[in-house]
Image (cartoon, rainbow, N blue to C red):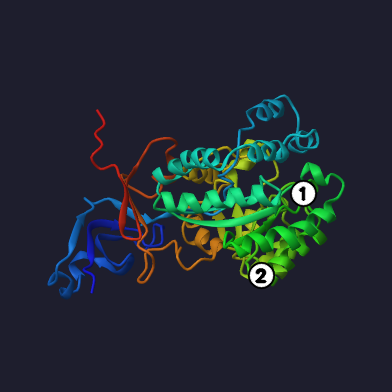
Amino acid sequence: MTSPSIWTNATLAPRACSAGLIENAAIVVRTGRIEWFGPMSQIPDHYLDQPTQTHDLSGAIVTPGLIDCHTHLIYGGNRAEEFALRLAGASYEEVARRGGGIISTVRATRAATEDELFSSALRRLESLMNEGVTALEIKSGYGLDLESEKKMLRVARRLAQARPVTILTTFLGAHALPPEYAGQADAYIDHVCTQMLPALAKEHLVDAVDVFCERIGFTLAQSERVFQAARRLGLPVKMHAEQLSLMGGAALAARYQALSADHLEFLDEAGVIAMRDAGMVAVLLPGAYYFIRETQLPPIELLRKHKVPIAISTDSNPGTSPTTSLLLMLNMACTLFRMSVDEVLAGVTRNAAQALGHPDVSGEIAIGAPADFVAWDIESLAELAYWSGLDRCQLVVRHGQITRDNREQVYG
């Protein structure tokens, strides 16, 4: 049997919340999973009587690894010029209707080579990992034809091989209408459902399926066709819903037992109840809310009232949330959405894990869970949502192996 490793001298936050902290704690890891955790004084003797590798965490606060459950990390170019247009008064919808928005990134992504996409996405991935992210989702949706979507999803799989991080892929072919299908939305959705998705699933490039249900995206009927195609292939679904208007997308997603509905600024109580009954997660994206200067807040109180789990994510993308800092999203969720520290930490750990729906991502320090955790140079968990730009990440462990070690760094 493989010898365990023991991580000692930690202040442990198994569920990333202020309740249930364990001081002078230890974690026992074997073959990449947590076999035991608790006070150091209670470590079972048999662990001490066998060869072990011991790591001293020097009293650091230790949380589960962070999870970024909604990103568009792979794309060509950037949209800084559109940012300037919006500052001058153009709305997100106006920019999109003038040929900008998602389609401008589609053009750049189609023109980029796979290696170019890999190189640019790797920089963004490294930034997330440096802040303690051990798992994330990456969506396609900037190719909008079979070969370009395939190229993006292959890059996502390459990133997972190149770095010690768990990456789940989501096919977002129904992100926007490509130029070659102008005025033919139904025909494009037919292509997505009968050609693109089956081909990509056959190559095992897809873990879940998403759709942008919105006035500038796709209708409820078109979105449902995508969900039906995903169901035929046994793939879970999720949805960009109620970001710019109330279309009933979240309720539709609930009928298909979606993992999550994301954005949700215009979600109503009926949609919240439908999500609750379907066991869905509400993924809120404060970076996009901030960046497009939205004024309609997501229905936080309704989500709390009906006990819908809330996840927080970067929505890292070139048009509406060009960020690679999940910790900054914690601060924004607290300041813009008035969420508590415990709520936002749950939002990037256990609730984010539920939004991904994968057995290799738990968002908790628990027996049998993957040994994904982070040691922080902080005095309280509130500091994770308090600081902006101050690196407090000491050590990142994924599947029991150290992936980032900043403990030797000296600041003078």
Distance from disc 2 to disc 1, alpha carbons, whole Å, reads 23 Å
Please name the residue shown 35% across and 48% down the image.
Answer: 380
- Indicate left or right for 275 with 348 as reference: right
Q: Is residue 274 placed above or below 382 in the rendered structure?
A: below
Q: Which mark is residue 149?
A: none
| Quadrant location of the C terminus in the rendered image | top left
> In terms of depth relative to the viewer, which is nearer, 195 or 356?
195
| Foreground disc of the pair 2, 1 | 2
Tag 2 residue: 233
Tag 1 residue: 217
> In terms of depth relative to the viewer, which is nearer, 339 or 198?
198
In which quarter of the view is residue 319 placed? top right
Which secondary structure, mark 2? loop
Asked if one can make out residue 269 in the rendered structure from this viewpoint, the answer is: no
Image coordinates of residue 127 in percent, x first then y, are: 44, 40
| Quadrant location of the N terminus in the rendered image | bottom left
Asked if one can make out residue 345 in the rendered structure from this viewpoint, the answer is: yes
- Indicate left or right for 122 with 265 as reference: left
Q: Earlier in the sequence, mark 2 or mark 1?
A: 1
- Indicate left or right for 84 with 382 as reference: right
Image coordinates of residue 153 in percent, x first then y, are: 58, 52
Image coordinates of residue 62 in percent, x first then y, are: 32, 54
- Indicate left or right for 234 with 218 as reference: left
The residue type indicated by label 1 comes to: Gly
The residue type indicated by label 2 comes to: Leu
Task: Categorize mark 1 by other alpha carbons within 10 Å: few (<14), some (14-19), many (20+).
Answer: some
Image coordinates of residue 400 in percent, x first then y, are: 31, 60
Please name the residue shown 76% across and 37% down the image.
Answer: 96
Q: Is residue 45 placed above or below 8 in the rendered structure?
A: below
